[in-house]
Image (cartoon, rainbow, N blue to C red):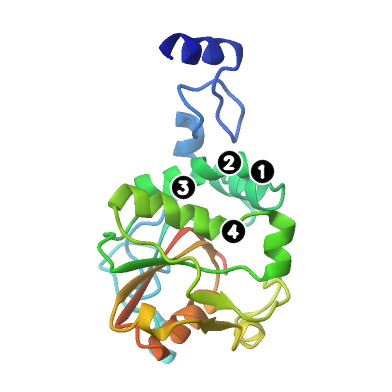
Amino acid sequence: MRAIAWGLDFLFPPRCPACARRNERVALCGACDAAVAPAESPLCSICGESFAGSGPDHRCSRCFARAPHFARARACAVYHRDRRSPLIEVLHRCKYGRDVTLAPVLGGYLADHCPLPVDHDLLIPVPLDLERLRWRGFNQAAVLSHALAVRHRRPIDRMTLQRRRATPPQVGLGEDERRRNIAGAFAVRDATAVQDRTILLVDDVMTTGATVDECAKTLRRAGARQVDVVVLARAADR
């Protein structure tokens, strides 16, 4: 088996999925990894939004005005729409190019850089509507949550939280428009599956947080004790 693996690496050497340079394994190379901006303090203690400057974490003005239904939301990285992010490039190729071979790269990145302790009773991915799932062929949030579940040996539930109606893409919408667009889009199939449980909700990206907040609201109304959120990356210029 080692000889076969050596032969495959010789004929098809592993490359960085962002820049295509030869690499020790199929993962971001050192240069591309260094180009990913980590989500660092000071942050909003609830939604995880990054603040400029230095100082302790504290609640942002949005969370003061409207407290989310989740307890904490954190991201591995932040990205700016006008700057290159190798992590976002790989994510877009996976999602919109429907390249499922990149899913282990993204799942591994989340597992390696997860900013929250994964000690929850249950991991739940943000669901896709059926039409989008059929087009893409996979749910990227489910792939990410699977990587965390395996790494931390936690149970995962892909079926209890469901998207009961398709919604237009959130891209280009303002915060209030996003909330109206996603309102009532989710449902819990079996409330006993989440009753009095701590849940880690997993998604790929977070912009205003409208989608994960609607999911958290649905889970809390079904009886979940606490909902935390972890995403691969969040927009710094939302």
Query: In this view of the protein, can residue 171 be seen by the observer?
Result: no
Q: Residues within 10 Å of mark 2 (few under 14, many from 20)?
A: some
Q: Which mark is residue 99?
A: 1
Q: Nearer the viewer, mark 3 or mark 4?
A: 4
Which circle's residue, 2 or 3, is located before the other in the chain? 2
For mark 1, give the secondary structure: loop
Residue in the picture at 28% in, 67% down? 120
- In the image, what residue type sits under mark 4? Asn
Please report whichever mark, 3 or 4, sits nearer to the chain's N-terminal start: 3
**Crowding near the residue tagged with mark 3, few <14, some 14–19, many ≥20 C-alpha atoms within 10 Å:** many
Amino acid tagged 3: Gly
Three-letter residue code for mark 1: Asp
Q: Which residue is mark 4?
A: 139
Q: Position of residue 75 (x, y in %)?
A: 42, 60
- Helix, strand, or loop for circle 3? helix
Label 1 close to label 2 by CB (< 8 Å): yes
- Measure how far apart labels 2 and 3 are at the Cα level: 9 Å
Residue 177 shown left or right of residue 43 in the figure: right
**Residue 184, label in figure:** none
Q: Which mark is residue 102?
A: 2
Q: Write the residue at 29% across / 52% down.
A: 152
User: 184 or 174: nearer the eye?
Assistant: 184
Up the image or down, 81 lies above or below 107; here it is: below
